[in-house]
Image (cartoon, helix red, strand yellow):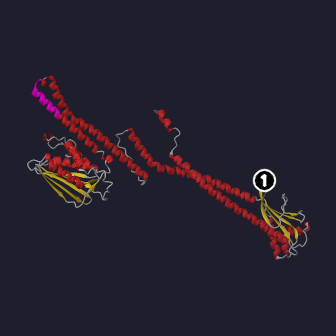
């Protein structure tokens, strides 16, 4: 057994870990997408700034060298560019113009950047000036252009511009600015590291949060599982799912499970009660039959009078056992109405009138009065045969226990959202003490007289269980020597049933009488 259990749980993964894992994957995907978008956007901005620096540097160099009207020489370029870097301050003090100071400052700023290389070429594409000794490749262009290239496996930005004379517009040389993108790479590297740390932290935090959230959300399921395990270990256990207080589907599931466990326990109790009742009630008739048979075997069979008396007594007890078993089965079925007859619909007026007419015909020596205070047809959710059975039980009891005044009153009325059915007799009546017990199984007010009348003490129990199963109630008012009144209340259907809903109801007289005969036999 232990091997089977371990095999069954092998490879099992907790929902908490599954939830945490897949939540982390979702967060990872979202953060990665966000990081990629942010990284691309940020690097584009950085790259655009580098291009602006190149463009500004080209503008500064071009402005300083475009005053010549002939091709540039190395001396010319050095005169305008080199002194601006090394002697910019002295030039400013020696009376150079404001524009020269501005250009000088611009050149100093641009040339001082570690990643910026400024090269000037002649019209023959020979190098005339370089701001740094780093190797570069010359790129020719007809107009100013900034492009991305690769040098020794590294990405670079190169800006190239033909230098044109301001005086005659002739080509006097070329200016090229190369950005090694060192600062760009360092900044993007730091950004990439920050985003990587952000992704890792986000995934870890998401996993922890998802695990805790899953643990909290699965707590009701654990409560339900514990309850099921307790009931599985001990079927008679009263363990129930505690109030989950979540007000969600899991709380509904817990309530549903509790309802199912309560129903199951009721069925178990009913089964045990059925077995106990049958065994108790059958003990007497079986003992009587056994006694008569043993007597006949010993000496009674030789005496015709004793033989006849024993056979009659045994037959009577056999009939009583058959009636008892039938009633017990009726009671057992009544306790499972929710499953088998939950959606049946019946016209109370029709059934009431039918049973009234049947009893007038069967018992012509009794006077039956019928007061119908309803002004329209009343429909309730109850199986037609069950309503007939309850009415037959009440009327049969009224007739059995009527003494001198052979009269039975029936009434049908409505109150609020319920229909009221009353059956009144003027017979022996029931004491206050017995009124509390008349609906118990096998209870008889006067056991000796009840057996003489053919009752087993189950009729009112069946009626009580049937009415309660359809969410109604049955009550009794009685006084010793004055008779009893049994009242039934059933909820009225607020929505009138359609013809399709009434299609399966037995409306013909023959089927109704057949059902009535069957019910009459079951309580006699």
Region in magenta: 302-315
Residue named by callout 1: 153
Q: Does 303 lie within the magenta span? A: yes
**Vertical comparison of 332 with 417: above or below:** above
Q: Nearer the viewer, residue 488 or 237?
A: 488
Q: Quadrant of residue 133?
A: bottom right
Q: Secondary structure at mark 1?
A: loop
The residue that appears at 64% across and 53% down in the rendered structure is 197
Task: State the residue at coordinates (49%, 37%).
Answer: 8
Q: Examine the structure image and report whether residue 127 is included in the region drawn in magenta.
A: no
Foreground residue, 128 or 468?
Answer: 468
Can residue 430 be seen here? The reply is no
Q: Vertically, is 284 above or below 66?
A: above
From the viewer's perspective, tell me whether residue 192 is left or right of residue 97: left
Q: Is residue 477 above or below residue 128?
A: above
Q: In front here: 315 or 42?
A: 315
Q: Residue furthest left?
A: 404
């Amino acid at each position: 057994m232990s091997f089977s259990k371990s095999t069954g749980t092998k490879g099992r993964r907790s929902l908490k870990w599954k939830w945490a894992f897949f939540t982390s994957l979702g967060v990872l995907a979202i953060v990665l997408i966000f990081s990629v978008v942010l990284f691309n956007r940020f690097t584009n901005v950085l790259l655009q700034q580098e291009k602006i620096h190149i463009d500004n540097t080209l503008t500064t160099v071009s402005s300083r060298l475009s005053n010549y009207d002939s091709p540039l020489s190395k001396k010319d370029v050095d005169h305008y560019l080199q002194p601006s870097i090394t002697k910019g301050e002295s030039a400013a003090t020696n009376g150079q113009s404001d524009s020269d100071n501005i250009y000088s400052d611009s050149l100093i700023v641009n040339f001082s950047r570690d990643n910026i290389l400024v090269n000037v070429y002649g019209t023959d594409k020979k190098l005339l000036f370089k701001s740094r000794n780093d190797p570069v490749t010359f790129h020719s262009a007809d107009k100013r252009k900034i492009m991305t290239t690769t040098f020794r496996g590294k990405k670079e930005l190169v800006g190239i511009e033909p230098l044109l004379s301001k005086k005659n517009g002739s080509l006097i040389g070329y200016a090229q600015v190369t950005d090694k993108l060192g600062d760009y790479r360092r900044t993007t590297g730091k950004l990439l590291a920050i985003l990587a740390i952000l992704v890792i932290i986000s995934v870890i935090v998401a996993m922890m949060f998802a695990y805790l959230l899953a643990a909290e959300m699965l707590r009701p399921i654990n409560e339900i599982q514990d309850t099921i395990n307790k009931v599985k270990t001990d079927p008679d256990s009263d363990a129930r799912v505690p109030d989950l207080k979540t007000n969600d589907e899991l709380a509904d599931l817990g309530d549903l499970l509790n309802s199912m466990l309560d129903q199951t326990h009721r069925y178990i109790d009913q089964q045990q009660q059925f077995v106990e009742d049958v065994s108790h009630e059958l003990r007497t008739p079986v003992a009587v039959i056994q006694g008569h048979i043993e007597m006949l075997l010993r000496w009674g069979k030789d005496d015709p009078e004793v033989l006849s008396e024993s056979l009659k007594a045994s037959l009577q007890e056999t009939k009583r056992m058959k009636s008892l078993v039938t009633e017990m089965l009726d009671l057992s079925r009544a306790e499972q109405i929710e499953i088998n007859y939950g959606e049946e619909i019946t016209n109370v007026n029709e059934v009431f009138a039918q049973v009234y007419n049947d009893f007038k015909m069967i018992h012509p020596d009794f006077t039956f009065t019928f007061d119908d205070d309803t002004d329209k047809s009343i429909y309730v959710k109850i199986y037609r045969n069950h309503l007939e059975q309850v009415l037959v039980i009440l009327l049969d009891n009224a007739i059995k226990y009527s003494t001198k005044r052979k009269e039975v009153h029936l009434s049908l009325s409505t109150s609020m959202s319920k229909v009221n059915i009353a059956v009144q007799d003027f017979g022996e009546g029931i004491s206050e003490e017995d009124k509390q017990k008349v609906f118990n199984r096998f209870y008889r007010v006067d056991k000796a007289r009840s057996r003489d009348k053919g009752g087993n003490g189950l009729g009112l129990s069946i009626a009580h269980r049937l009415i309660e199963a359809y969410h109604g109630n049955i009550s009794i008012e009685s006084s010793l020597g004055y008779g009893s009144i049994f009242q039934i209340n059933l909820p009225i259907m607020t929505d009138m049933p359609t013809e399709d809903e009434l299609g399966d109801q037995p409306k013909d007289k023959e089927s109704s009488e057949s059902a009535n005969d069957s019910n009459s036999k079951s309580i006699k």
